[in-house]
């Protein structure tokens, strides 16, 4: 089978080229003249590059047709050697050009760990010269021989060079710990801003991926491949030259787009959502966090499921079949749906437990403050600064994932609970928001939201808009909110605080006392005069009044206890609600207790 660009090539020519597979060559014949003559003949006839892969035993492994300037080598990455050379050498023609090897040629030699890469100059259907390259003392420093005249190729010397290159690669690999090698990725965006691509690079860094190339194309979205086919071809060559392992796209890819891109690029293709889900899976530590991430991953991957074991399909007819059976992909989908059901049930059970804990905190009348904001805005650092917590705080996106709650003392001596929530990001996956909705809504039950903003980031206004959008989707746009502008130590001059905006540095502590004082003032109780009669058996209500009263509590003992005290308004409301529930007080008006 002839691979590559066969469009417009006559069937007869394809059949003649297909006969190359039947040719047998000596293992010591580095570049057989008979093979060069056929490749040159059809290069001249088609005006296209032709490549042939030869194994060390002289067998022809692949024949491909390219364009007049390059040739795709689809199977190259699949044959890459890991601890030694791949055992394959590539011979390809250059129509009406020199035999000089291009940067892509040399990059392919290195990335595929090929035995050799050879370019053949062709003119008027005749092979003119050959240049050969081998991996040298370093993978990116090839050893180049030639050009040699086509009829004077030193086959034995070049074959011996393969042996030497094999030894050199073995030494290079032995000095490199393969387990420490990072995945190498190319980032691809479509009409994306520099800020968006920079954020994608930060996400890749958080996932322990090395970014080797970034490309942004300006054009309408292609319906089948997201980017243009010409750009796909260009990126395939770039990936080969840079030894990339993965392509990361800045938007969500449809299942068909991802499949078409992987078929064309011959490398792993993931989109922004997959990358974020992978980061969450790495950083989730609590049971609920792990369940939520797994749920989001299953929901996202369900429509992208491809049946790997098609030979299990029983959808065909024939003797002994009553009707179409289930294909393997249908069985896989049913198993995933069942797992999704189980995860949702378990998350609801944990949500019920969390509601009980919240009710306990409410009974203790401890104020709750939720820290929300863009990822890497410094929420964890702020929590550490106000509560002496030991939460992981590093300069990475989504470094902390599971919500953490810690006590902190306010200037008045009262204590409050500060909860660090999961960070937001642009294009936060919908499945992830849905999976974490219960956790986020728990935090949003807080008495106060602190929206933490990295003011040193030039895109902080856009990041604030993203946070507001996510909060709006959760129904939290009307919550009591303070804006906390963090990392002011990176500014030349710190701005002045305003009514709802405070400027701090979690790193140095600057501005935190003023912020805590403002929070304390917001939580300062509004005291009201309470006069109520209680039964002697209602000791819990009596204790509630005594615990929260300001000043003396006056008690007249008679048939019942008549109590007068100055208490916070919420204490008064709780006592009246309790007495109404017991039928001790009747509501005269809908808005009154009496």
Image: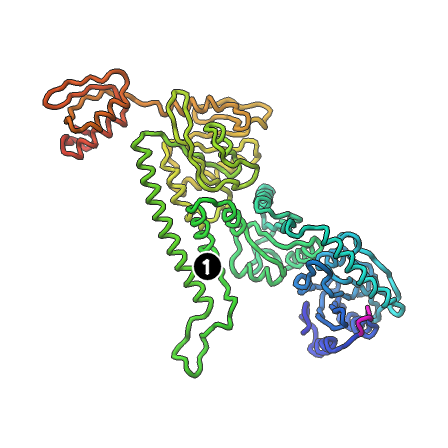
Quarter of the rendering occupied by the N terminus: bottom right
Q: Is residue 468 visible in the rendered structure shown here?
A: no
Residue labelled with disc 1:
302
**x and y percentages locating residue 459 in the rendered image:** 55, 36
Q: Is residue 28 magenta?
A: yes
Identify the magenta region: 26-30
Horizontal and vertical percent position of residue 90: 75, 65
Badge count? 1
Q: Residue at x 52, y 50 (%)?
A: 278
The residue depicted at 32 percent of the width and 23 percent of the height is: 525
Main SS, magenta residues: loop
Q: Is residue 54 above or below residue 546?
A: below
Q: Position of residue 6 (x, y in %)?
A: 68, 70
Categorize mark 1 by other alpha carbons within 10 Å: few (<14), some (14-19), many (20+).
Answer: some
For the C terminus, the quadrant is top left
Furthest-front residue in this view: 174
**Considering only vertical position in the picture, is 405 above or below 513?**
below
């Amino acid at each position: 089978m002839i691979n590559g660009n066969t469009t417009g090539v006559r069937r007869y020519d394809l059949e003649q080229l297909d006969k190359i597979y039947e040719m047998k060559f000596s293992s010591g014949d580095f570049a057989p003249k008979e093979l060069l003559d056929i490749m040159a003949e059809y290069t001249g006839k088609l005006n296209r590059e032709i490549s042939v892969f030869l194994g060390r035993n002289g067998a022809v492994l692949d024949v491909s047709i390219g364009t007049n300037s390059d040739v795709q080598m689809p199977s190259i990455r699949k044959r890459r050697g890991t601890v030694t050379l791949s055992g394959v050498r590539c011979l390809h023609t250059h129509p009406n050009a020199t035999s000089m090897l291009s940067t892509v040629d040399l990059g392919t030699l290195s990335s595929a760990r090929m035995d050799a890469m050879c370019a053949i100059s062709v003119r008027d259907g005749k092979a003119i010269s050959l240049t050969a390259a081998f991996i040298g003392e370093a993978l990116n420093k090839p050893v180049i021989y030639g050009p040699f005249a086509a009829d004077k190729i030193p086959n034995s010397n070049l074959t011996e060079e393969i042996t030497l290159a094999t030894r050199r690669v073995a030494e290079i690999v032995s000095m490199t710990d393969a387990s420490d090698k990072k995945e190498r990725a190319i980032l691809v965006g479509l009409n994306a801003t520099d800020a968006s691509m920079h954020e994608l690079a930060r996400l890749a860094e958080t996932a322990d991926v090395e970014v080797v190339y970034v490309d942004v194309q300006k054009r309408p979205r292609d319906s089948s491949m997201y980017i243009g086919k010409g750009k796909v071809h260009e990126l395939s060559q770039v990936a080969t030259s840079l030894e990339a392992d993965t392509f990361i796209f800045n938007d969500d890819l449809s299942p068909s787009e991802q499949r078409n891109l992987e078929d064309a690029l011959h490398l792993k293709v993931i989109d922004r959502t997959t990358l974020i889900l992978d980061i969450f899976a790495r950083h989730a530590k609590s049971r609920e966090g792990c369940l939520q991430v797994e749920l989001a991953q299953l929901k996202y991957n369900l429509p992208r499921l491809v049946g790997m074991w098609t030979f299990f399909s029983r959808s065909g007819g024939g003797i002994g079949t009553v009707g179409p059976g289930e294909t393997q992909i249908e069985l896989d989908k049913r198993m995933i749906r069942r797992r999704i059901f189980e995860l949702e049930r378990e998350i609801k059970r944990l949500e019920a437990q969390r509601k009980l804990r919240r009710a306990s905190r409410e009974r203790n009348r401890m104020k709750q403050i939720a820290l929300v904001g863009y990822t890497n805005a410094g929420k964890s650092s702020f929590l550490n600064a106000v509560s002496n917590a030991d939460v992981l705080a590093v300069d990475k996106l989504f470094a902390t994932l599971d919500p953490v709650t810690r006590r902190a003392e306010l200037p008045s001596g009262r204590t409050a609970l500060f909860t660090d929530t999961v960070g937001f990001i642009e294009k936060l996956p919908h499945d992830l928001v849905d999976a974490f909705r219960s956790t986020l809504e728990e935090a949003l039950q807080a008495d106060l939201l602190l929206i933490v903003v990295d003011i040193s980031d030039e895109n902080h206004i856009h990041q604030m808009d993203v946070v507001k959008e996510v909060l709006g989707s959760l129904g939290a746009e009307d919550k009591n909110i303070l804006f906390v502008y963090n990392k002011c130590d990176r500014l030349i001059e710190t701005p002045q605080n305003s009514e709802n905006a405070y400027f701090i540095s979690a790193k140095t502590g600057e501005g935190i006392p003023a912020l805590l004082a403002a929070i304390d003032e917001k939580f300062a109780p509004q005291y009201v005069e309470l006069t109520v009669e209680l039964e002697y058996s209602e000791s819990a209500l009596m204790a509630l009044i005594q615990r929260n009263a300001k000043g003396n509590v006056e008690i007249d003992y008679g048939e019942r206890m008549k109590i007068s005290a100055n208490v916070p308004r919420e204490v008064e409301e709780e006592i009246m609600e309790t007495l109404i529930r017991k039928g001790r007080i009747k509501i005269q008006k809908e808005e009154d207790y009496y």
